[in-house]
Image: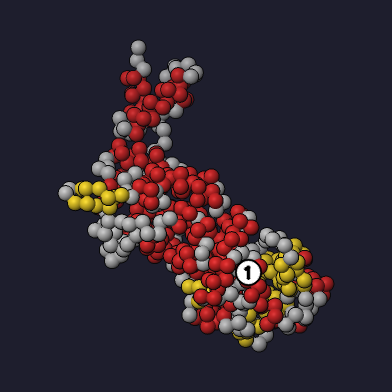
């Protein structure tokens, strides 16, 4: 692991005798063993009092004692080069909630005792750079190899947020929960309401934006008994679908398959974190309306399982779910509009309908809708993951009309009305609204055409 350390950190650890008891801890060790380039390097220093650690690090750069009560120091050695150094500590639960802990900084605590406060064994791993040695006191390396999430100690249940952390770890690394850990999670399921919505949001967004196998996170949620706290999701289990169109099974199984299909898409993986979260949430929520809409109807002489209108019914359910996990208003609007229009490819589309669809989706885009529809179509194993013909036509028309990345913008503006001698006033809004409707209908495609439309429709 020493080979992948940033040069500045490697030099600090190598050339500072007082840091002989320094260990790399937490996610950086886990990610290194998984072959994932670590984003952050956290250093825990043993056998050194706080004041001496501050003086020692001060020789290398700017020291910020931002987490003194938690034994944490931030060392900045250059632009974009900030490292967290900490002293070992004990955490003791004294009250409900995430602030109900007392923290005792204990410089002489043994590494095996300090590592026991970590949530999962895969996060309790340590690396000693001086000896180039991996320290594994709780079987984390084997659990990582076997893709098992196991709690490190009985203190796991002191913070119920660890259940949601398990969800995002399971999704990010494709892991399953140890049976004893899932049983522990079920035992603290009633403490979900202790969690601040801000903390809930962090874990859901990590699941949505960083998962390689999103279904593993939702299966963890189900098996831990915590799915019941998200009823819009929980109720999908057992909702039937027509086997001809959905050979994979019920709506829950379909949703999991769609999410995994999305995570395999190169385009999704190349998006920024914000767009990945948006699309994962849209796929998660796209069939929330099916439980209340699903019924059996006769279609073409056969009884079929259908869910008419589920895309519309699902919008307020999506809003409710996203609000519960602390999503922003902007994200709730975008996801809701994608959910409402995820069957747009089943219509007979034309340039007019595509322009109107792009406008209806705003602030979401046809590009984002394309990926949602493709994930939906790909979540029907063993059926092949192919883009539906309606999506191909939608995609082609959107590219021709140049509305893939954004909706049409009004060509006719207020200043054009003034230039035509029209006096500013309430009538402006009516004229501009009518002009935009005509533009969406394809009555004109440029400013010259818009001005001709204006002259024609407003002539005495």
Left or right: 318, with 110 as reference point: left
**Image point 41% across, 27% down: which residue?**
433
Q: Which residue is drawn at 30% across and 33% down?
A: 442
Residue 106 sits in which quadrant? bottom right
The relative height of residue 307 versus residue 150 in the rendered view (above or below) is above
Nearer to the camera, 179 or 164? 179
Q: Is residue 356 left or right of residue 17?
A: left
- Is 54 on the left-hand or right-hand side of 114? right
* Nearer to us in this view, 237 or 81: 237
**In which quadrant of the rendered view does residue 236 lie?**
bottom left
Q: Which residue lies furthest to the right in this view?
A: 51
Left or right of residue 374: residue 69: right
Q: Which residue is drawn at 27% across and 56% down?
A: 242
Residue visible at 77% across and 71% down in the picture: 104
| Quarter the C terminus occupies | top left
| Residue under label 1 | 157
Q: Where is residue 289 in the image (x, y as percent from the top left)?
A: 39, 48
Looking at the image, is 178 positioned above or below residue 327?
A: below
């Amino acid at each position: 692991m020493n080979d992948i350390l940033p040069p500045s950190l490697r030099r600090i650890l190598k050339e500072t005798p007082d840091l002989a008891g320094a260990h790399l801890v937490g996610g950086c060790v886990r990610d290194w063993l998984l072959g994932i380039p670590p984003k952050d390097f956290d250093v825990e220093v043993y056998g050194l009092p706080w004041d001496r650690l501050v003086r020692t690090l001060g020789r290398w750069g700017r020291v910020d004692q931002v987490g003194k009560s938690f034994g944490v120091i931030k060392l900045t050695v250059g632009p974009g080069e900030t490292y967290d150094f900490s002293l070992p500590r004990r955490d003791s639960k004294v009250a409900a909630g995430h602030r109900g802990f007392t923290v005792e900084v204990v410089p002489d605590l043994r590494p095996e005792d300090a590592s026991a406060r970590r949530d999962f064994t895969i996060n309790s791993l340590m690396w000693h750079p001086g000896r180039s040695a991996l320290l594994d006191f709780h079987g984390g390396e084997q659990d990582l190899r076997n893709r098992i999430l196991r709690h490190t100690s009985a203190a796991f249940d002191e913070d119920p947020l660890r259940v949601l952390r398990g969800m995002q770890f399971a999704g990010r690394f494709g892991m399953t929960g140890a049976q004893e850990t899932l049983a522990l999670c079920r035992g603290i399921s009633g403490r979900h309401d202790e969690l601040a919505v801000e903390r809930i949001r962090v874990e859901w967004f990590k699941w949505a934006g960083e998962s390689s196998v999103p279904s593993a996170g939702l299966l963890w949620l189900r098996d831990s008994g915590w799915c019941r706290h998200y009823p819009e999701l929980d109720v999908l289990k057992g909702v039937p679908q027509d086997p001809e169109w959905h050979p994979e099974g019920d709506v829950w199984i379909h949703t999991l398959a769609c999410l995994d299909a999305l995570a395999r898409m190169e385009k999704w993986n190349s998006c920024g974190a914000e767009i990945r979260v948006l699309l994962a949430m849209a796929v998660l929520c796209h069939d929330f309306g099916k439980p209340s809409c699903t019924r059996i109807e006769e279609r073409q002489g056969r009884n079929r399982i259908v869910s008419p209108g589920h895309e519309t019914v699902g919008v307020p359910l999506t809003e409710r779910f996203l609000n519960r996990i602390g999503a922003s208003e902007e994200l709730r609007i975008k996801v809701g509009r994608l959910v409402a229009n995820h069957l747009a490819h089943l219509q007979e589309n034309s340039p007019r309908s595509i322009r109107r669809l792009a406008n209806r989706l705003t602030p979401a885009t046809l590009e984002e809708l394309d990926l949602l529809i493709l994930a939906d179509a790909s979540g029907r194993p063993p059926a092949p993951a192919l883009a539906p013909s309606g999506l191909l036509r939608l995609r082609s028309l959107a590219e021709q009309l140049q509305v893939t990345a954004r909706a049409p913008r009004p060509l006719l503006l207020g200043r054009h009305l003034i230039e035509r001698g029209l006096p500013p006033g309430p009538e402006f809004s009516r004229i501009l609204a009518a002009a935009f409707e005509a533009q969406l209908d394809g009555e004109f495609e440029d400013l010259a055409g818009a001005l001709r439309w204006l002259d024609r429709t407003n002539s005495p």
